Amino acid sequence: VQLQASGGGLVQAGGSLRLSCAASGRTFSNNGLGWFRQAPGKEREFVAAINWKGGDANVAGSVKGRFTISRDNAKNTVYLQMNSLKPEDTAVYYCAAARGPVAAERMDQYTYWGQGTQVTVSS
């Protein structure tokens, strides 16, 4: 089982990026999917999660109104649209698949993790 995150890069403040995370080896259409991030010297934190059908999502307060999570079960892929990026959004972003179907916010609710993609926002 593999989760492959992509779409990171260097962007100026106020810009946008779209992260993708494609799963292979098994389907996650019955599982919640999420994004977490870890900035240098900081702990990994929750960013956004979406339930198995895509009808319910949770988003961290720090990114609410700027980031949107979505999924395409036919492609076994989860996305994170990031708009109005700020320098404090700079981090390695990780996608993950939850054990259950809900939009989980805790790391211990996730079983599979991607390798991470770097997002750097310059001021």
Image: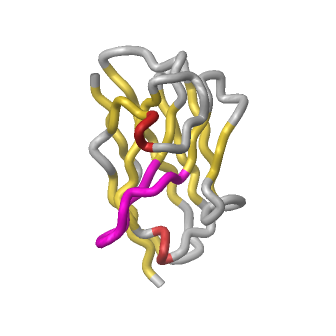
**For residue 92, side relative to residue 87 (left or right):** left
The image's colouring method is secondary structure
Front position in the image: 25 or 11:
25
Residue 59 appearing in the image: yes
**For residue 85, side relative to residue 111 (left or right):** right
Q: Residue at x 48, y 84 (%)?
A: 123
Check the picture and name the quadrant holding the N terminus: top left
Q: Position of residue 111 (x, y in %)?
A: 36, 30
- Residue 105, picture quadrant: top right
Residue 45 versus residue 57 in the image, above or below: below
Magenta stretch holds residue 34: no
The residue range painted magenta reads 36-47
Residue 87 versus residue 117 in the image, above or below: below
Residue 9 appearing in the image: no
**For residue 107, side relative to residue 71 (left or right):** left
Residue 95 versus residue 71 in the image, above or below: below
- Residue 4, picture quadrant: top left
Q: Position of residue 98 (x, y in %)?
A: 46, 29
Residue 22 versus residue 24 in the image, above or below: below
Q: Position of residue 108 (x, y in %)?
A: 41, 38
Q: Residue at x 30, y 70 (%)?
A: 40
Front position in the image: 10 or 53:
53
Q: Residue at x 42, y 34 (%)?
A: 110
**For residue 84, side relative to residue 2 (left or right):** right
Front position in the image: 56 or 18:
56
Q: Residue at x 54, y 16 (%)?
A: 30
Magenta stretch holds residue 39: yes
Q: Position of residue 80 (x, y in %)?
A: 54, 47
